[in-house]
Amino acid sequence: MPLIGFGLWKVTKSTCADTVYNAIKAGYRLFDGAGDYGNEKEAGDGIQRAIKEGLVKREDLFITSKLWNTFHAREHVKVLAKKQLAFYGIESFDLFLVHFPISLAYVDPAHRYPPEWFGDDGKVHLQNTPLQETWQAMEELVDEGLAKNIGLSNSQGSLILDVLRYAKYPPAVLQIEHHPYLTQEPLISLCKTLDIAVTGYSSFGPQSFLELNMGRGAQLLLEHDVITSVAKSHNKTPAQILLRWATQRGIAVVPKSNNAERLAQNLASDGFDLSEAEIKSISSLNQNIRFNNPGEIDPRIAIFA
């Protein structure tokens, strides 16, 4: 799995195919999608265009997607995985993740897709599907060649350890919110001990959440004195510093950009090294600020409590 990929969260449908195609032209090979993002068909169009034109072969790409909360029951996992594969026009995912360790009531895709968090009545409806059932259905995807690797997202250490008690295939990857305001160092250390790769999303902290009014009033990391000072000393952008802070510690990142220059800058962010002192100074910004917290949608799904 490449350390630097392209994230598809919040990439609009109208631009997604071209955005993905241009990202491939720029050199990106890892694409991080999800059923919940609502743009997998368009992302697949961009990928298929690049393959058809000979820019890449399928085997050159690492395509990640995620199972949404409403499809955790054993009988739904494979059906939705196949639906999502069809959107991309591929036969298997390189990585398929459980998006959240939260089971919600099933919503027929013919009725609404993606179903998001709420029912037709605007309320959250829980479903009593244990994660063990979901994980074992995920393992069937591997057995049938629909996914090469499976993993977890937005999960804490105790849950990972529980999955390992019954897993035939242990999680290959854990994807988490990760930025200097939320370093999650004990969790990352556990994953390294267990040989589970880590992907960090929202590498720029509050930046991704401003348009959702979820920035919590936190100072923008791209403008923080610690980050801009390190950037100036290396003649790099603040975004490159934030990405390198993660990748230099072995954590994959999946930023997005519609700007060609920033696309190239993000991809080139592993071309230099930070000093240990710089890494520590950036990590010291940790305030355990979590921007993506389902508990604020409904207190019954406060998975980070």
Image (tube, rainbow, N blue to C red):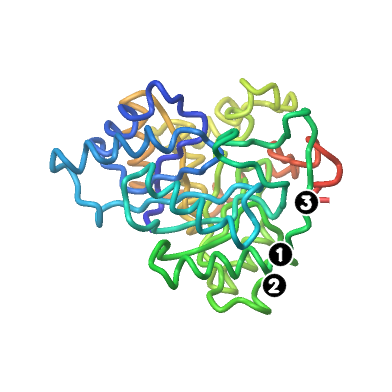
Label 2 neighbour load within 10 Å: few <14, some 14-19, many 20+ = some
Amino acid type for the residue under numbered disc 1 = Gly
Q: Horizontal and vertical percent for residue 18?
A: 30, 27
Q: Regarding mark 2 in the picture, which secondary structure is present there?
A: helix
Residue assigned mark 3: 303
Amino acid type for the residue under numbered disc 3 = Ile
Q: Regarding mark 1 in the picture, which secondary structure is present there?
A: helix
Residue assigned mark 1: 157
Number of marks: 3
Q: Regarding mark 3 in the picture, which secondary structure is present there?
A: loop
Q: Distance between the residues labelled 3 and 2?
A: 15 Å
Amino acid type for the residue under numbered disc 2 = Leu
Disc assigned to residue 247: none
Position above or below: 250 against 168: above
First-in-chain label (3 vs 1): 1
Position above or below: 166 against 260: below
Answer with the quarter of the image where residue 260 lies.
Answer: top left
Q: Horizontal and vertical percent for residue 112?
A: 59, 33
- What residue is rendered at 50% in x and 33% in y? 38
Residue assigned mark 2: 161
Q: Do the residues labelled 1 and 2 touch (CB within 8 Å)?
A: yes
Q: Horizontal and vertical percent for residue 87?
A: 39, 42
Q: How far apart are marks 3 and 1 (CA)?
A: 12 Å
Label 3 neighbour load within 10 Å: few <14, some 14-19, many 20+ = some
